[in-house]
Each structure stands twice: as C-alpha cells, then as structure tokens.
Image: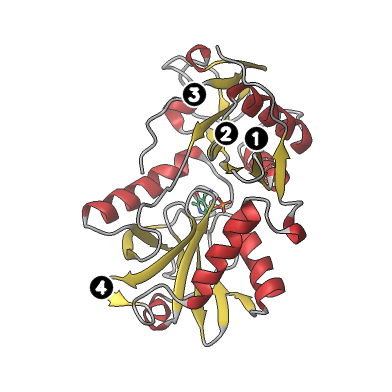
Amino acid sequence: MSVKALPIHAYFEGKIVPYTEARVGVATHAFNYGTAVFGGLRGYWNEAKQKLFLFRPQEHYQRFLNSAKLMAMEFGLTTEELTRITFDLLQADGYRRDVYVRPLAYKADEGIGVRLHDLVDELTIFALPFDKYVANDTNAHVTVSSWRRVDDNSIPGRGKISGAYASSALAKTDANRAGFDEALLLTQDGHVAEGSAMNIFMLRDGVLYTPPVTDNILEGITRRSIIEIARQDFGLPVVERSIDRSEVFLCDEFFMTGTAAQVLAVTRVDFRPIGSGEMGPVTSKLRHFYNEVVHGNVEKYAHWAVEVPLAEPVRP
Ligand code: PMP
C-alpha cells in the first residue's frame, strides 16, 4: 500500500533533473504553511499494447490550474504545456508499468509570514511506480469520521490544496487505527461528503446518487468519468444531491472513486452490511469497465487514455 520507491527524475525549476537535485529549504513557505496545491494522475501500462496511457491529463491539469488560481498562483502554462512536460518526465523515467504522477505548485519563498500575495510560485512534477492505494478495494469497511470535511469558507475543498490534507490525514489515520479501511467525512451540516481522498457513490433502487460539488467535495475526475459511463454505457440515472448518513446504511451498493483508489467497493459501514454485504453487480461492472477504459481498451473513451510517447529512458 505505501509507496517505497523514490522518483527517478523531477521537473523542478523549469527543467527535468535527477530527483536528488529537486530540493527545497526547510523555510519554504509551502512547507511551513501548507500553501501548495497538487494534482494526481495515473499512468496505466498496457502490457498487450506495450503502451503507457495517461488518464485524462487535460482535465487533471485544468483542475490543477484551478486549484492554483484559488491560491493566487500564476504560471502562465497551459494544460497542453503541462501535459507535454509530463510526457517528457515519463519519457525520461521510462517506466513500463503503472505510475502515479504528482504535479505540485507551491509558494517557494523562504521566510516567515502568512499570506498568499507577493510570493514566488514554483512548480514541480514527479512520478512514482504505483499499484493499489487501498489494499482492500473489493469489500472495504468504512467508518463515519468524527472529523468534518473542510468547508468552502475555511479551505476550499473543490481544489487540491495541500494544507487541507491535514484534515484528510486526521480522518484516515483515526479510521485505520480503529481497524477500518477508509473514512467517510461529513459536511458541517451532516451530509456525507466524501472519503479522505475519494468521492462517493450510492446505489439505491436503481438510481446512482453522488453529492453535488456544492457539498465541499473535491471535483473529482474519476467521479466525472463514472457519472458519464454510468449514464451512457450502463443506462443508469445519476442524481447529484446531498446524501444523508443513514441513507448509506440502507443503500444497495456503495463505492468510492479516485485516481489512486480507482473504483473501491465498500461493503460495510460502521459494522452494518451494505446491501448483501458483498460487492454488488453494478460496482463490479463499473470497476471492470473503468479498468478497461483507463488501459486504453475502450474505443469510445480512447480520448481519455492518452498515449505517452516512449523511447529509451534516460538514466541520471
Ligand atoms: N476527494 C479528495 C479529497 C481527493 O484527494 C481525491 C483524489 N484526487 C478525490 C476526491 C478523487 O478525485 P480524482 O478522481 O480526481 O482523483
């Protein structure tokens, strides 16, 4: 579950360098105050095709730029340029396996003073080998966390702002230490928002429900993809509305979505079985279909799985 390998290279201060050269000082603003934003993309290795596919890079980088905008950062880079830098990085790394790509934009000044303005913005991107994020992703047991999801009026959750992840980390660790696989975080007014790093879906009487983007959720790319697939390919009605905690106890199926978590089947919440207590047929089919899409095996969604041009890797 935990990732042990270090990145080989990083895009750092405008160029691709060996990872060991991508270093910041301890006084760096973002390190002290959480004034950074990040993204998270997956690259999927297709063994049969001998190709690496990056999942929806344009959408991920659009959200990344939106997150940066929330934190008053400006790079003058387009989503196309960020995608091209990522290709160069993956080309240099040369992974022929599944990877996770982490773009990070941060307030780079070294010194004291809480603010967003009049600070230097820097950008780094690195990639790591990556497999499963949550070990038990076919029958996860989750708990409703006593920690609340960050509110739009404290730290906007629709962007991936580094400082907000202290809240996710509190929820995740308490859940894991209590023996659960994941946490469910409620909004300040008590609706189910999402997991520590994944959006949520509930199937009830043939309708798929997911919280709206106004319920303090991250605007998830996997969420958006699953909504489209559910509607278009599974003929499932999808309704975006607030979800009560007790509805989760009564639903037929429940799953979580995220770049890292993919489609994670939840079969128990706070010791109550969801539906039959086993992964349901809709979750199972969506998992399978999503897996084919991200590996570039579904013609209709070929534009989501963008092939990374690969040649011989560069070794530092
Ligand atoms: N919520 C949070 C808090 C997350 O960190 C993530 C992971 N990026 C998600 C939801 C899922 O978003 P995505 O599908 O874009 O990875």
For the residues bearing labels 4 and 3, Cβ distance under 8 angstroms: no
Q: Name the residue under label 2.
A: 96
Q: The residue tagged with tag 1: helix, strand or loop?
A: loop
**Real-space Cα separation, disc 1 to disc 4, in angstroms:** 43 Å
Q: Is residue 71 left or right of residue 57?
A: left
Judge depth for marks 4 and 3 and give the one in front.
4
**Real-space Cα separation, disc 4 to disc 3, in angstroms:** 42 Å
Q: Mark 4 points at which residue?
A: 271
- Residue 149, given in percent of the width and then of the height, sits at 43, 57
- Residue 141, given in percent of the width and then of the height, sits at 31, 65
What kind of residue is marked 4? Answer: Phe
Identify the disc placed on residue 72. Answer: 1
What kind of residue is marked 1? Answer: Ala
Q: Residues within 10 Å of mark 4 (few under 14, many from 20)?
A: few
- Residue 109, given in percent of the width and then of the height, sits at 54, 18
**Residue at the image position 28 percent from the left and 70 percent from the top:** 270
Q: The residue tagged with tag 4: helix, strand or loop?
A: loop
**Real-space Cα separation, disc 4 to disc 2, in angstroms:** 40 Å
**Residue at the image position 27 percent from the left and 53 percent from the top:** 176
